[in-house]
Image (tube, rainbow, N blue to C red):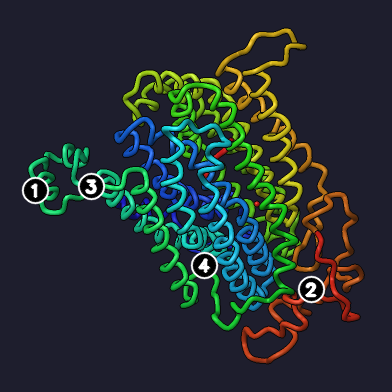
Amino acid sequence: MTLRDRVSGLFKGREEFDLTSGDIGKPLFYLSLPIVVTNLLQTAYNLADTFWLGQYSTESLAAISFAFPMVFLLIAFGMGVSVAGSVLVAQHTGADEPGEAEYAASQTVTFAVLVAGFFGLIGFLGVESFAGILGAQPAVAPLVGEYMRVISAGLPLMFGFFVFISLMRGYGDTITPMLVMFGTVVLNIVVDPFLIFGFESNPLFGMLGLSGLEASLLAATGYTGNGVAGAAYATVFSRGLAFVVGMAIMFQGTRGVEVNLREMVPNPSYATRLVRIGVPASVEGTGRALSVNLMLIVVGFFPTTVVAGFGIAVRVFSVVFLPAIAVARGVETMTGQNVGANKPDRAAAAAGLAAKVMFGVLALVGVVTWIAAAPIAAVFTNDPAVVDVTEEFLRWVAPTFGFIGVMRAYTGSFRGAGKTMTAAVISITMLGLIRLPLAYVGVRPPAVLGIESLGTVGIWLAFAVSNAIGALLAYGWYQRGTWRDADVRRGPSAGDDDEEPTDEGDGPTSAGEVDGPTTAGEVDGPTGAGEVDRSRSAADATTDDGSDADPTDPAPVDD
């Protein structure tokens, strides 16, 4: 067997494994591995920016340390739409309802682009003011503005690709997004240094021994690059191209879930369903993003070298935690499809297996990171002071990496079941009620406590403690089992985690429940294959008596 055969054997398409029957470990592996690769490629965008801007100037590196959490914040506001779409597609697919899955995907794309456009406008207009609030120094704040204005303008394109990934994952296809991402990340890495440096002092030409060619190009064009804004242009262009390719694939419908232009007309009734599932996920994502931004206020008490070191360490975390995030997304899809197929025990087994494996894998990665902290930091900067800060941060947090794997596995299963509010509460508790207060008190303890400031160690310690507590909280809550009877196809279940489960097989006896297909794959309405009567399907959340249903009732990186 050749090396190519061995590698290709690690990747299997949706048609080659069953998420709702048979073995659990292999389907979860085949589902998660492409997500790991996709997330590695996605992180390569940010790492490329970090690497090249680190060669450009320390101020530019500090600028993206502020900008990355702000980008995540903008995306987090709208991420609930993609989470809702992924969960709905997964549960409809598990229940063998392809028409409803396609409609969910089509509506998700429409509302995702609208939401991203709205928040992109807010980001474009308010970025520099927000950077000042976060404590960006005068030399750094304008650079943050340059980067963020470009990103904000391109947010619909960037977010559109994230939605493509989510919808395909909900269906169970994680290979197609990986392949699309590969091509666009290569494009970004190639374009990045040219848009940042232009043809003046571009380190890429020096690495390749082409300084003479650089001088000729500079003389011919006079282009000296766009600095920090150039990195943003490269990212938007590459991710925008990925979105276009992704939409072409979904319109064609030969791989993964299909979207139809006629079903993309905004349906306000269906929007309530997306809101019901998605708002808690947006709250979770926004809470994570705000925690990073608010943490920057604490980090901003220290010199720019500390801010830069903090930013590098957070980028390193974004790579380290990719397996946990990928497996959590895999668990989310497996839970969604198995809840849709009425197999909660199988969903629980998948979450438990993922938690154990990720704890072991990330604990081992933590040991390696602790030992190699200094060389890792030196990859991104040649400033000794920044290297020292990054090394110290990594060594404090590395021993708790395993706990992140546990927390991610169980919160992923909560989301897949539709219990997005539970996942949000766990996340916000970990970040907002534990990490931030501990960091602030560690850096600036109230006089009444009678203790001295721990300096930057107070921040690092807060990360370590919150990681451990977050894992224990997620595990304990999951064992309660209140997620088992959740089914977002039937009605509100993303909110109160203590609500009484409805009896299987009952009709719509409470607000928000709707008639689903009477047998697997069947829907009321037109007899044409795949057509769905929106007046009687989950698209119009109405009860049998015609009354309105109750509409009340998510990487980057923060761990």
Mark closer to the chain start, 4 or 1: 4
**Label number found at residue 541:** 2
Q: In percent of the image, x 47 and y 58: which residue is there?
A: 153
Which of the two residues, 522 or 451, is positioned nearer the viewer here? Answer: 451
Left or right position of 248 against 28: left
**Tag 1: Cα neighbours inside 10 Å, few (<14), some, or many (≥20)?**
few
The amino acid type found where label 3 is placed reads Gly
Q: In this view, does 328 lie above or below 528?
A: above
Marks 1,3: beta carbons within 8 A: no
Q: Which of the two discs, 2 and 1, labels the residue nearer the N terminus?
A: 1
The residue where tag 3 is placed is 198
Return the residue at label 4: 15
Count residues near mark 4 (Cα–Cα under 10 Å), then give few for <14, some for 14-19, many for 20+: few
Report if residue 368 is visible in the image. Answer: no
> Could you tell me which residue is drawn at 44 percent across and 73 percent down?
248
Q: Residue 513 occupies which quadrant of the picture? A: bottom right
Q: Earlier in the sequence, mark 1 or mark 3?
A: 3
- Secondary structure at numbered mark 4: helix
Q: Quadrant of residue 228?
A: top left
- Distance between the Cα atoms at labels 2 and 4? 32 Å
Q: What element carries label 3?
A: loop
Residue 354 % position (x, y): 62, 43
- Disc ID at residue 216: 1
Q: Distance between the residues labelled 2 and 1?
A: 65 Å
Q: Distance between the residues labelled 3 and 2?
A: 54 Å
**Residue 339, percent from left and from top:** 73, 60
Q: Nearer the viewer, mark 4 or mark 3?
A: 3
Dot 4 amino acid type: Glu
Q: How far apart are marks 4 and 3 (CA)?
A: 46 Å
